[in-house]
Amino acid sequence: MQWLRQGLTLLLAIGAVTVGALFSLQNTQPVPLDLMVFQLAPQPVAIWVLLALALGVMIGLLAGAWLSLRRAATIRQLRKQRDRLLAAAEKGANGDSE
């Protein structure tokens, strides 16, 4: 079953690269990018799309890393709280039996 998943992933990756290459070959017209504050030099449309994709991937990775760090901090805090509660419960159980 794992080989099927790997095969489908490989086919999907090859398909994405093929579509990207065809897109790049079809969109060679230089287009300037106007960012309201300044205007960038004309580049092929494919370059602008790939740069936007790369920027989106980087933003997504940074957001995912930030969320992961927050989750790890919350887990650490909850584990400390659990340990304190267990210690207090054991102390209370030992005090009741005496």
Image (cartoon, rainbow, N blue to C red):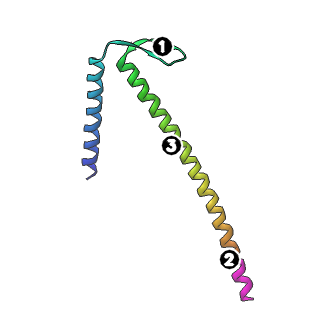
Q: CA distance from mark 2 to mark 3?
A: 37 Å
2 left or right of 67 in image: left
Crowding around mark 3 (Cα neighbors within 10 Å: few <14, some 14 to 19, many 20+) is: few
Q: Provide residue 94's location: percent of width, then percent of height.
A: 71, 83
Query: Which residue matches tag 3?
Result: 64
Q: Provide residue 54's location: percent of width, then percent of height.
A: 44, 28
Label located before the other in sequence (1 or 3):
1
Name the magenta segment's main secondary structure.
helix
**Relative depth, front residue between 10 and 49:** 49
Q: CA distance from mark 1 to mark 2?
A: 65 Å
Q: Provide residue 48's location: percent of width, then percent of height.
A: 40, 20
- Outermost residue toward the bottom in this view: 98
Dot 1 lies on which element? strand
Query: Which residue matches tag 1?
Result: 40
Q: What stretch of residues is rendered in magenta?
A: 89-98
Q: Amino acid at mark 2?
A: Ala
Residue located at (38% from left, 19% from top): 47
Is 66 within the magenta? no
Q: Are marks 1 and 2 in contact (CB under 8 Å)?
A: no
The quadrant in which the C terminus is found is bottom right
Dot 3 lies on which element? helix
Position of 76 relative to 84 (above/below): above
Q: Amino acid at mark 3?
A: Gly
81 left or right of 43 in image: right
Say which mark, if any, is on residue 89: 2
Q: Nearer the viewer, mark 2 or mark 3?
A: 3
Residue located at (52% from left, 40% from top): 63
Q: Nearer the viewer, mark 1 or mark 2?
A: 1
Dot 2 lies on which element? helix
Residue located at (53% from left, 38% from top): 62
Position of 82 relative to 55 (above/below): below
